[in-house]
Image (cartoon, rainbow, N blue to C red):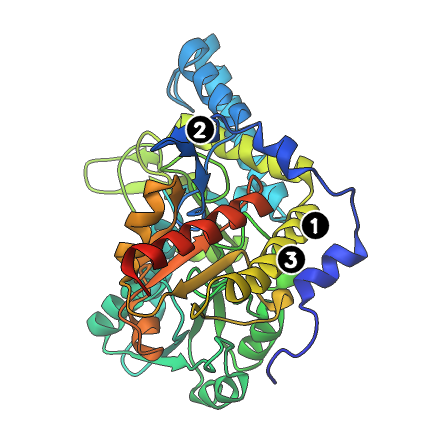
Amino acid sequence: MAITSESSVDAVAVAHPRPAFDPAVVRRDFPILDQEINGHPFVYLDSASSSQKPQVVIDAMADYYCRYNANVHRGIYTIGEQATAAYEQARARVGRFINAPDSHEIVFTRNATEAINLVSYSWGRRNIGRGDAIVLTEMEHHANLVPWQILVQEKDGDLEFIPITDDGILRLDVFEVLLRLRPKLVAFTHVSNTLGTINPVREMTEMAHAAGALVLVDGAQAAPHVPIDVQELGCDFYAFSGHKMLAPMGSGALWARRELLESMPPFLSGGEMIREVHLRRSDFNEIPWKFEAGTPAVGDSIGMGVAAEYLMDLGMDAVRAHERELVEYALDVLPREVPGIALYGPMDPSLRGGVVPFNLPDVHPHDVAQVLDRFGVAVRAGHHCTMPLHERLDLAATARASFNVYSTRGDIDALVAGLKEVQRVFDV
């Protein structure tokens, strides 16, 4: 049951074509890229860690802080009402971005990590008990692993893992076997932050539901890069970060089906998430505000809404097509121009997001990244918050180049030139 043909993501792009955008034009929207680093044009290839921000997002946040900075859902005065309207408009924009049935199913969080913890603490502690199984995968980011470790240790539950093939594809035949354990939850990444693997969310969700499990999808690496329709995917929870999808640091969201959110107790408590408070009891607010205790990150959430609108204006089908072209180019030129380079993950661009991990023989990834920085090229080096995945691949660390809407073939060419300099410096 491994994926062998064009992924459903690319099928969506083919079915709903839009005019391709010009990455050179898009790049001009990102002021941080218009600079030199160490005397070289800045080449940013660490978007999987955090994306850069377009001017329109920066302007929207500055506008909030300059013109109508106020708390939301509180002040009955002009700028307070403006802030509340902009905050809720951002929620609606984020809801449209993932085709949520109702914007009230969008809970603002600081990031995908907090969104997953919200589900773990709120839904998990009410529904996971002794002997209950949760199924994850070997490729999960620590954010979709550690919260479940803590939960099953507390509740005496069990974790099971879908293994991967050597080229980074999930073993769905083993997944079928694990589902015989009747897990309560299956949680997995939509797109691997380390390997770039695009997982078959809809197929896996249907399999999990047939076994009686709920499904949580970590969409942190998917939201900036592929069309997302939570109704079509069929999952129960979808978590994603704003800062990876051109939005500010400290922004993120959880989408969940209304009936699940309504049944879940509050994650944090205090102001905003209450309707009435008495000395010995409190009545909680409606969703989504039941999960948004205290003063929210209003400016960041507004920025996330604008970033979602920016991506929708580009067209996520065009974004995916652009990224696939970059991946195809990188997978071709890197092994051809950089002798001995080792690449990891699926070699089929239709199965891969904009992430290319690699190693050079006899050069530590940290040294690779440090030398590349001398030439203005920024890549990530380390375990990328996927230590178990690196253990599975028998790797101490990898270097990783990752792309976004502002990335170009010229960036990849600069990476190639920089890697040749790394080989020259280390005489390999």
Front-most of residues 297 and 419: 419
Disc tally is 3
Q: Which disc, if any, is residue 317?
A: 1
Residue at disc 1, secondary structure: helix
The type of residue carrying mark 3 is Gln
The residue sitting at 45% across, 81% down in the picture is 166
Residue 396 vertical placement versus 291 (above, below): below
Residue for badge 2: 32
Q: Is residue 35 visible?
A: yes
User: Where is the C terminus found, in terms of image quarters?
Assistant: bottom left
Closer to the camera in the image, 419 or 188? 419
Q: Does residue 230 sit above or below 68 in this rendering?
A: below
Q: Kindly state the secondary structure of the residue where label 3 is placed.
A: helix
- In the image: residue 98, left or right of residue 153: right
Q: Which amino acid lies under the numbered mark 1 shown in the image of this protein?
A: Asp
Residue 232: percent from left, percent from top: 67, 60
**Earlier-in-chain disc, 3 versus 2:** 2
- Residue 183, picture quadrant: bottom left
Residue 231 is labelled as 3
In the figure, 295 relative to 322: above or below?
above
